[in-house]
Image: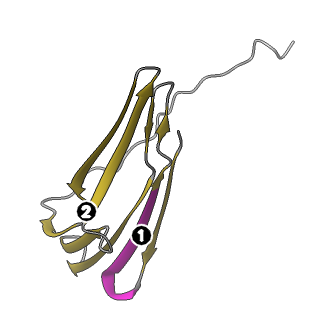
Amino acid sequence: MFNANIASGLKLSNGWRTGINIYVNGGQLTVQQQSNAYISSSLNVSKDIIKDKLTFSAFTNNPYKRYRVNTTNSFGPNFDRVSHDQQNFSSFGGSLSYKFGKLKESIKKNKRGINNDDVSN
């Protein structure tokens, strides 16, 4: 069994941002069961409408394939079973977010520290 995830984002001009995410699942193999592998992807884009206040975002997941078929093979000395199930795989959506208020104080660094002088002899 293995999983891998690759994500990348890009900040464009005029408040635009875009990103892509690719996920790979290598399936699963145990003593009596095996399941199929799959690849998933997502794309997103966002735009600052009012700088640092109002943002519109849109995304799509797996736009190339509407359904994913999960196949599971269970086996043993006295049985063999194959199971197929189908799930919705693609989706899309959007959001509008507004940030209220702002941080009134700057974040202060801790003035104290650890002085490790026990090895200086």
Report x, y in % for residue 26.
50, 48
The quarter holding residue 93 reads bottom left
* Discs 1, 2 touching: Cβ within 8 Å: no
Give whichever of 36, 42 is nearer the camera.
Answer: 36
Give whichever of 21, 69 is nearer the camera.
Answer: 69
Query: Mark 1 to mark 2: distance in Å?
Result: 20 Å
Q: Is residue 1 placed above or below 114 in the rendered structure?
A: below
* Residue 104 in view here: no
SS majority, magenta: strand
What's the mark number on residue 3?
A: none
Q: Residue at x 14, y 59 (%)?
A: 101
Q: Which residue is mark 2?
A: 67
Callout 1: SS: strand
Give whichever of 72, 40 is nearer the camera.
Answer: 72
Q: Which residue is mark 1?
A: 20
List the single residue furthest toward the bottom: 14
Give whichever of 25, 83 is nearer the camera.
Answer: 83
Report x, y in % for residue 57.
22, 72
Q: Quadrant of the C terminus?
A: top right
Highlighted range, magenta: 13-23
Callout 2: SS: strand
Q: Amino acid at mark 1?
A: Ile
The quarter holding residue 80 reads top left
Q: Residue at x 52, y 27 (%)?
A: 112
Residue 102 on the magenta segment: no
Q: Residue at x 18, y 70 (%)?
A: 53
Q: Is residue 12 placed above or below 43 in the rendered structure?
A: below
> Which of marks 2 and 1 precedes in the sequence?
1
Q: Is residue 73 placed above or below 9 in the rendered structure?
A: above
Number of other residues with Cα within 10 Å of mark 2, as a class: few under 14, some 14 to 19, many 20 or more: few
Q: Residue at x 45, y 51 (%)?
A: 37
